[in-house]
Amino acid sequence: MAETQTASHKNEKLGQVVSAKMAKTIVVQVERRVPHPLYKRIVTKRKKFYAHDEKCEAKAGDTVRIIESRPLSKLKRWTLGAIVRRATQVAVEPSALDNIVVAPVAGKKKK
């Protein structure tokens, strides 16, 4: 028998990870562009979803696909499907931090 992959009928959303600070939980912000009901101007609507990340793979800034699942907690109803694109990581050399000069803030003089 050949293994056939069945199409999932569960809802999927694509969004950006806003927070990955909780244990096995990520917060994903999904944006959608819809026309305003009265003025017909295109507006961007944002909604945050809590998703289960079993292996703690996703980091803040990653673009991910989340899949609808059974309720896992009070707020979690989604699971991490796949990481579509990783966020760019900017590395800073520790020696580069030594050369930074902090200028005093201009403002009121102390008496």
Image (cartoon, rainbow, N blue to C red):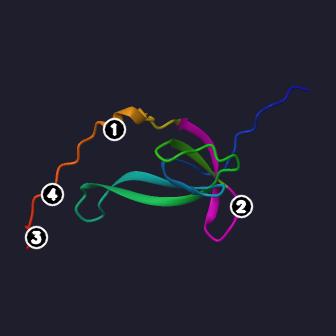
Q: Earlier in the sequence, mark 4 or mark 2?
A: 2
Q: Nearer the viewer, mark 2 or mark 1?
A: 1
Which residue position holds label 3?
110
Residue carrying label 4: 105
Eye-nearest disc, 4 or 2? 4
x%, y% of residue 55?
A: 69, 46
* Pointer 3 or 1: first along the chain: 1
- Residues under labels 2 and 3: Cα distance? 61 Å
- Residue extending farthest top: 2
Where is mark 2, residue-wise?
A: 70
Which mark is drawn over residue 45? none
Q: Residue at x 15, y 57 (%)?
A: 105
Instruction: Indicate the amino acid at tag 2.
Output: Arg
How far apart are the alpha carbons under marks 3 and 1?
29 Å
Q: Earlier in the sequence, mark 3 or mark 4?
A: 4
Vertical comparison of 25 with 84: above or below: below
Q: Quadrant of the N terminus?
A: top right
Q: Which residues are magenta?
A: 69-84
Could you tell me which residue is drawn at 24 percent across and 55 percent down? 41
Give the number of the disc on residue 98.
Answer: 1
Q: Amino acid at mark 3?
A: Lys
Q: Percent from the top left, x then y, of residue 93?
A: 41, 32
Dot 1: element: helix
Hey, which residue is sitting farthest bottom in the picture? 111
Element type where label 4 sits in the image: loop
Other residues around mark 3 within 10 Å, as few (<14) / some (14–19) / many (≥20): few
Residue at image point 37% right, 58% down: 45
Horizontal and vertical percent position of residue 70: 71, 61
Quadrant where the C terminus is found in the figure = bottom left
N-terminal label among 2 and 1: 2
